[in-house]
Amino acid sequence: MALGRAAGRLSQLLGRGGSALPGLIAEKIDSRTIEKLAAGLRRGAVVVTGTNGKTTTTKMLVGILEAEGLSVVTNPSGSNLARGIATHLMRAASWRGRIEADIAVLEADEAAVRTLSARLSPHLVVVTNLARDQLDRFGELATTAEHVAAALRHADVAVLNADDPLVAEMADAGAEPRFYGAAEQVRRLMPADSNLYGAQEETGPRPELRVRLERAEVEGYGEHVELALGKDRLEFHLQVPGAYNGYNAAAALLAGLEFGVDPDRAVAALQAIRPAFGRGQVIEYRARRVRLLLVKNPAGFNQVIRLLGEVDPCPVLIAINDLDADGRDVSWLWDARLEDLARSGHRFGTSGIRAYDMGLRLKYAGIESWSEPDLAAALERLVDSADEGETVVLVPTYTAMLPLHSMLLPGTSKREAWT
Amino acid sequence: MSDLVIAHLYPFEMNIYGDTGNVIALTKRLEWRGLHARVDPVPVGADYDLAEADVVFGGGGQDRSQLEVAYDLQRRAGAVDEAVEDGTVFLTICGTYQLFGRRFLTRDGTEIPGIGVFAMETIGGSKRMIGNIVVDSPWGELVGFENHSGRTFLDAGQEALGRVKKGYGNNERAKEEGARRVNCFGTYMHGSLLPKNPAFADQLLALALARRYGEGAMLASLDDEMEWRAAASAARRP
C-alpha cells in the first residue's frame, strides 16, 4: 500500500493528475485494498449511485455530514470506478494504511457499484435514478438495474427515489428501504425519459416518503426548494439549478438523517453547496456570465431542457462530442425533447465533433441554429452574441466540457476541475 | 384530415436508439411541404388495423422488450404480410428488423420466433458490432450507427438494402446490410437513420404517396444542407 501511495505522489509530481494510477497499483498489490481501508471508517461508508445526480448528491451529503463535525472521505466524479475509489481511500490513509476518517461518501458508477458494495459493505446506498445512458457501454438498462439491486444486498439501508419505477422496485433488494420523492405538482413538471408520446401511465401505490420535494422553482442561478419532513417544512435556496437538484437535496438530506444529522444544520449545509464541476457552475468570462450545464444522456438532457424553459431568453451553445466518455452513438439526441424549447426565445448555436447532428436535431425540433464545430471559435461566437453583463448558457457533453472549462478558467488544472 | 398515416410499432417497448427521430423526420419532411401526417402509436396488445397505415415504423429494443414484442408480432403476422404485399411502406430497424426474419436464435439458445417477412435468420454472437456505418444503396450513400450482436444471414435471393462500405452490416462477413421486400425495408442502422439520410426518407414518403394517391405524386425539394453535413461528419467517425 505504501508503494501505491508513492506511485500516487510520483504521478502527481509528473503532472498526470494522479487519479487512477496509484489505485491500479494498489489493486494489483493487494486485491483487498478497499476492504482493509474501509474497515477503519468509524461510521462506515455511503455509496451514491444512479444515472444522473450522483456527483451533486455526493457533494451535498459530504457537506451535510461535515457540518455535523464529521471527517469525511470522498472521491471526485472523474474517478468513480473501483480503481479511482481505491486511490481516494488511499490518499486519506496514513502511512500505516489506516483511514483517519469517520465516514466515506463515495460516488460509484452503476457498472462498478456491485463489486464495490460487496467489498465495502456500506451502511447505506443511495440510488438516485436509472435511465438509459450510453448503451454502447452498459448494454441493457435491465442489466444495470440488476447490478444496482445486487449492490443493495451488501448494505444495511437503501435510500431510494420513489418516483423512478426501476429504483422504487428495489425496496425488496435486501437493504432496509427509505424513500424520498416529490409531491404531485413537482412530478408533473419533470419530463419523462421517453419519447414523443410521453410516458406510460404509472400504476400501483406509492411508498411512504420520508422526505418529500414539495416545491422547486428557478431562483436566480439556483433553485428555490421546499422539502417536507413529516410535518416540518424546510424552505431554502440551492446554488444549483433545476428541479432535479431538488431531488438530489432530498436524497442527501434523507441519507444524512440516517446518520442523525440535525435538519436545520443540514439545510444550512445544502444552501452552501456550490455547483460541482460543470453542473450548474457559473463562470465569469469576458464580462459575461457563462452557465455550464453538463449533459450525458436523454434523461439529463430533458432536465436541462426543462430548466432552459424556465430561464430568461439568452444565447445557448450545445456542444456534442462522440468520444468514448460521451458515448460514441449520438442517437440519444433524438430522445431529448428539444421541441419543448421551440418557443423559449433562446438563440441557439451548436459545436463539438457532432455539431451538425445537434444542429439537425434542433432543425427538426423547429429551432434555427448556427453551427461551429471548433469549440474555441464557438465559445467566442457565443460570448460575442451577448452584451457585457449578460448571461449565456453552455450545454456540453463530458469531453466537450473539459476543454471549454479550461478556456473559461485558464490555469485551472484538470485535477482541480475534477473535484 | 391527414395526408398520410404513420403507424409506430411498439413505441414504448422498442425505443432505445433515438428511434422516434425517424418518425419526427418523416412527419417534418411532410410538414415542410404542406402535408400532414397522423402518427398512430401501436404498443404491445393494441388493437390496430395495419391497413390504416401508409408507413409502418418499428425500432430497436432491449432484450426483455424484444421477447414481449416477438409474441405480440406473431398475432399480427398475417396482417403484416398482407400489408407488405399490398405495397405498404415499412421501415424496421435493429430489434424489429430481426423479428421480421424467420427467427432469432439468441446466444443462450433461446429461439425467438420471427414473422418471416424477410427470408433470413439471425444468430446471436459474442461480438458486439458497434460503430458508425456507411452503406451504398440505390438511394445513395446511407450513414447510420449500428450496435448489435445478432448476425443476420439472408437466404440466397433475398434482396439486401445495400453494400457495406464501412462497418459490419448484417454480419461481419457478407458485406451486405439490411433487407428489402416490396416496400418493406429492414436495417441495423439507427442514429437516427432518416434525419441524416434525407434522400432515403423522401424515397419512403414518395413510395407511400404514390401508393395512396397514384403515380406522379411529387415531393418538392428541400434545403438539406444541414442533413448532408451531419451525414458527412458521421461517416468520418469510428
Image (tube, rainbow, N blue to C red):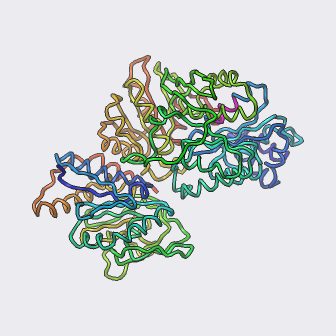
Q: Give the residue at the far bottom of this rendering.
A: B156
Left or right: A32 as drawn, with respect to B76: right
Q: Residue at x 70, y 52 (%)?
A: A174
Residue depicted at 56% across the width and 55% down the height: A138
Whole-percent x and y of residue A99? Answer: 84, 39
x and y percentages locating residue B164 in the rendered image: 38, 68
Q: Give the quarter of the image for residue A416.
A: top right
Q: Residue furthest top?
A: A389
Residue A357 in the image: state x and y as whole percent.
37, 47
Residue sticking out furthest to the right: A96
In reply to whether residue A397 is colored magenta, the answer given is no
Q: Main secondary structure of the magenta part?
A: helix
x, y percent for residue A260: 75, 30
Q: Residue at x 56, y 47 (%)?
A: A130
The span picked out in magenta is A57-63
Q: Is residue B81 visible?
A: yes
Locate residue A246 relative to residue B78 in the image: left or right.
right
In the rendered image of this protein, does residue A88 appear above or below residue B116?
A: above
Is residue A22 visible to us here? no
The residue under the point 30% across, 42% down is: A363
Q: How many marks?
A: 0
Q: Is residue B49 left or right of residue A39?
A: left
Q: Residue A38 versus residue A226: which sits nearer the camera?
A: A226
Location of residue B11 with respect to A413 vertically, above or below:
below
